[in-house]
Amino acid sequence: MDHYQQSQKNKLFKPEHGDPYLEPTPQGTAHCPQCGAVHHQGRWSWQPVVPDDAQQQLCPACRRIADDQPAGTLHLAGGFLAGHREEILGLIHSTETAEKSQHALERLLRITDQDGSLLVTTTGMHLAQRIGHALSAAYKGECDYRYAQDEYHLAVHWSRD
C-alpha cells in the first residue's frame, strides 16, 4: 500500500459501534430466502449456486427492510433537484446497482418525495456515502455527512440551488 492509499484508508469512517443487524453471525453457510444472498466464509454475497447444506436465514439487509430501519439516510434538496430529478434518480439507481453487485447488503430501502426534496434511505452506510460522493462528483453542490455517535447510522444532506 503506497502513502496515498494509506492516507485515504486513515480517513475512512470507523464506527465505534458495529452494525447490530450483523448479529447473530450464521455458523457455516446460510441462504436468505427473500433475496437469495449467501453467507459463506464470514461474508454475505451473491452466489450463482446455493450450497445444499445452507441454513435458511434472513440476511441483515432484508431484516433492515422488514423493520424499516435504515443505516443511511440522504436528504436531497435545492432548485437544481427539481430541474434534474430524473437524472439524479438515475444516478442513485445506477450507484445502487454497482454497489449491490459487489456488496449484497448495500441496497436502497426507499425513495420518498417530500415537498420538492427527496429522502433516500439505504440498508448500509456505505451506499449512502457512495451516493453522496456520486452526487457531488456529477453535479457539485454542497454535501454534508453526519455519523451518529451512539448508533450505526449515516445522514447525508446534499443540496444545490
Image: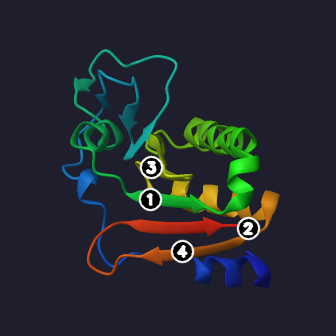
SS at circle 2: loop
Residue placed furthest toward the left: 24
Mark 4, Cα crowd under 10 Å, few <14 / some 14-19 / many 20+, is some
Q: Is residue 2 above or below residue 115?
A: below
Q: Which mark is residue 145?
A: 4
Q: Position of residue 156 (x, y in %)?
A: 52, 67
Q: Which mark is residue 64?
A: none
Task: Report the residue marked by disc 2.
Answer: 161
Q: How many marks?
A: 4
Query: Please, what is the three-letter code of the amino acid marked with disc 4?
Result: Tyr
Task: Report the residue marked by disc 1.
Answer: 73
Instruction: Tell me how far mark 1 sits from mark 3, CA to CA.
Output: 6 Å
Query: Please, what is the three-letter code of the amino acid marked with disc 1?
Result: Thr
SS at circle 4: strand
Instruction: Tell me how far mark 1 sits from mark 2, CA to CA.
Output: 21 Å
Task: State the residue at coordinates (38%, 25%).
Answer: 35
Query: Please, what is the three-letter code of the amino acid marked with disc 2?
Result: Asp
State the residue in front, 112 or 35.
112
Q: Position of residue 73 (x, y in %)?
A: 44, 59
Q: Position of residue 108 (x, y in %)?
A: 48, 41
